Amino acid sequence: MDNQIWSWFTYQPDKPLIFTQLYFWVFFTIVLAIFSVIYPRKTLRNAYLFLISLFFYYKTSGLFVLILIFSTVSDFLIGKKIYGSERILTKKLWLSLSVFLNLFVLFYFKYAYFFTDTFNSMAGTNYEVYNHLAYWSNSFFDTSFRADKILLPVGISFFTFQTISYAVDVYKGLIKPVRHITDFGFYVSFFPQLVAGPIVRASEFIPQLYKPYTLTRMEFGTAIFWILNGLLKKMFLADYLAVNFIDRVFSNPGSFSGFENMMALFGYSLQVYADFSGYTDIAIGVALLLGFRLPVNFNSPYKATSVGDFWRRWHISLSTWLRDYLYIPMGGNRHGSLFSYIMVLVVLLFVALLAERLSIFVIGLGVIAGVALLCRYLPTFKKWIDTNINLMLTMTLGGLWHGASWNMVFWGALNGVGLIIFKQWKRFSPWRDHSRWYFRAWSIALTLIFITFTRAWFRGESFDAAHLMLHRIAYAFNAAIIPEVLYNYRHVFIFLIGGYIIHWLPSSFKLWYRETFARQHIGVQVSAAVITVFLIYQVLSAELQPFIYFVF
């Protein structure tokens, strides 16, 4: 019994504290009970939720919580230095330090194996990854990190982007630095959105730290709706599709027909949306019960009528972060800047390292020189380059944010190409009048098809696996077995079709049933929660299915 109780407070790798575990909801109930007593005192409330968030991250990622604490302390101090500096140059130097530290931590844990393996392949060496940070921590703080392996801390891509946005917002004068480190720590580590977003801007969230707690009856009902909606998306829809069909096809695409591969792609488009937006829905609901409003992260992305429209609807917090902190500083669609060309060299170096051929970097430099020469003598070409270079760079770097592999580079670049083509196509497209339902339906279908086929690289286990999947679709479609496949996987296809139909319901109708639920008596909402749990347990798989974006 003592061991059982002790395990509740220690890191258990096989029992992470995540939304799909009953343990989380017991934990959250206790958090709410204590919160209901201390919430009027804002300083104490923020400190309490900061400590709870650290415990949550410890239960999810073990001693990687020290990385989160380091990021919190360093950016809290740097933010004060930026605000207190009178000279612009000094402010810029402190801001640069914040960006350097955050990107160093991100690159160290996320790309160490990529750089080591690439160097070994190119230089003929046999270096192994050694976790120096773990060694130093074990030596000085008596921790027990593995020094022979670098593991990726859950959510590191999300909280490093949040701390960068804080430093930038303080530098721009959008916010003042927070008064207490517990307030800043709470902003960085707020547990509902810590490990998979949405990415919260400092200028949007920090003002909430100093506002009194408010939660109307309508907001309470809305929070319950978002939590139940997210659980159904994740555990009833996404996990069922993954376990019973999608994972089987992606693990061995050569063993399935082209039709099955194509349906797996469309299934994955729905799965990744239901999985990721499901997490966001739960995070928004949990945060709202605590009196904090998180930004919307998805807006029915498969209703998008173009690639550009899709990226305004999908993972909105990341898309807008890249726009405001990368795309616009590089010059946006107005011109290429020195920052743009530095980023071109960075991407080119990544591609050369992926290919394990430095000659590609040299050839790339020659191409850049040729493009620069053409821009000097061809103003129209220069304007086209200036308009599109930053867009292409942003999408490619967005791909690299998801991981250092050919798959992610190609996926990001392909979306960049899609955006550029759309910008040109919309000028003379005969289907641009979306007031006509059939033109709109055609645009939605075309966008969904493009986005879905790029998922072959996003989800594929390797570049060759993605190519094999598309090859099977093109040359081994085998239409004759479609009736048999539809029958054998009839429950999967019912879920698949049902999921898309619900997604395409009018936004006004979704708002109506969300508000209707929020206004219902608490007994009705409790009954809905019981039914939700019952439905989930009907399709629950024996093995825990982690949220897809935990690996990013």
Image: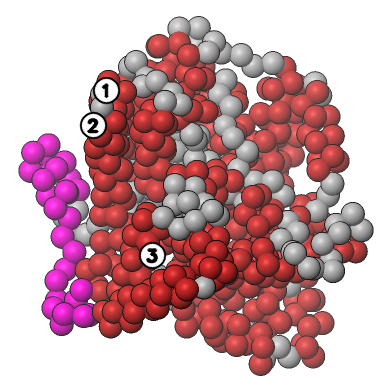
Q: CA distance from mark 3 to mark 2?
A: 27 Å
Q: Residues under labels 2 and 1: Cα distance? A: 7 Å
Quarter of the image with the N terminus is top left
| Side of 136 relative to 485 (left or right) | left
Mark 3 highlights which residue? Answer: 344
Which residue appears at 91% of the width and 59% of the height?
Answer: 437
Check if mark 3's residue and mark 2's residue have beta carbons within 8 Å. Answer: no
User: Residue 383 is drawn in which quadrant?
Assistant: bottom right
Mark 1 surroundings within 10 Å by alpha-carbon count, few (fewer than 14), some (14 through 19), many (20 or more): few
Q: Which mark is residue 190?
A: none
Instruction: Give the magenta range.
Output: 119-145
Whole-percent x, y for residue 250 in the image: 55, 74
User: Which residue position is annotated with label 2?
Assistant: 90
Whether 61 is among the magenta residues is: no
Name the mark nearer the viewer: 1 or 3. Answer: 1
Secondary element at image label 2:
helix
Whether residue 279 is visible here, answered yes or no, is no
